[in-house]
Image (cartoon, rainbow, N blue to C red):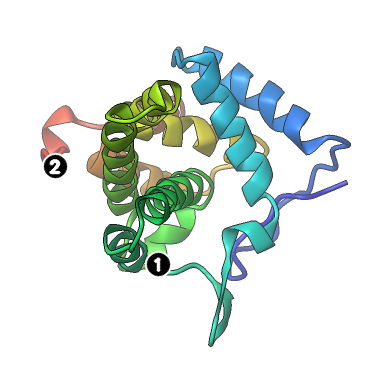
Amino acid sequence: MMGMLAPAEEAPRRVVAVANLREFFRDHLHGVLERQHLAVDDQTEHYVVNLLTLFARSDALYEQTPEGRRLKPLVVMLAEALEARSTGDRHRGLQRLGDVSLFVAGFFAHSFARKLIDIDYHIAIGGRAYRTLAEALGRGRSPVLAQVFAELAEKFQPLVDALNEVSESSCRHTDEDVLRLYEIWLKTGSRRAYRILRRLGVSPAPSARTPQ
């Protein structure tokens, strides 16, 4: 059995033991997508389930560096992908950049409150990586993959909302969480954050949002 990983500085959360992690993510994500009325192609949903299953293992998410296993800065990952010597390496670099951005924004959104880089940055750079990859594959012989990455790019922020719910389904919201939800809504226009705020008695004013 496996438990979900979490950043070292976050407080421990209740761990739910599951016998089959892929089935857990498949069933939970499908239910969340239905509740949030977010329609995605079956291939895209399958891709996200595989992504969650893979990155549930910390050795797949983090990379070995001289300072130990950690995530590379997104801007470094982008530069390495764009400067790759081969087309295949470039595609793999863009795919990992999109994957890491989606997973981290979806599962670690609240941890960004203490960092310089926020969730909207991950959404922007992850969506760009997927979009660039979709355009490149669309010119080749991978139309199905191109469609998957194009949909991931187009619906990146709503998918982050969906993964937020997968991650937070067993968590209670503290006053600090409410403030963070309000900040996420201001920066990304997250419909899920807006609904939770309304449910918690907070009525965000549309005029407070600054167009990104």
Looking at the image, which residue is at 54% across and 43% down?
173
| Image position, residue 100 (x, y; %) | 47, 52
Q: Residue 114 carries which label?
A: 1
Residue 16, by quadrant, is: top right
* Residue 198 visible within the image: no
Quarter of the picture containing the C terminus is top left
Looking at the image, which residue is at 54% across and 47% down?
107
* Image position of 136 (left or right of 145): left
For label 2, the crowd category at 10 Å Cα-Cα, with few meaning under 14, some 14 to 19 and many 20 or more, is few
Q: Which of 189 and 152 is in front in this view?
A: 152
Q: Are marks 1 and 2 in contact (CB under 8 Å)?
A: no
Looking at the image, which residue is at 78% across and 50% down?
3
Looking at the image, which residue is at 39% across and 33% down?
193
| Image position, residue 200 (x, y; %) | 46, 31
Q: Nearer the viewer, residue 39 or 187?
A: 39
Q: Nearer the viewer, residue 66 or 133?
A: 133
| Image position, residue 180 (x, y; %) | 39, 49
Q: Which mark is residue 212?
A: 2
* Residue 45 visible within the image: yes
| Image position, residue 58 (x, y; %) | 67, 60
* Image position of 96 (left or right of 179): right
Element under disc 1: helix
Mark closer to the chain start, 1 or 2: 1
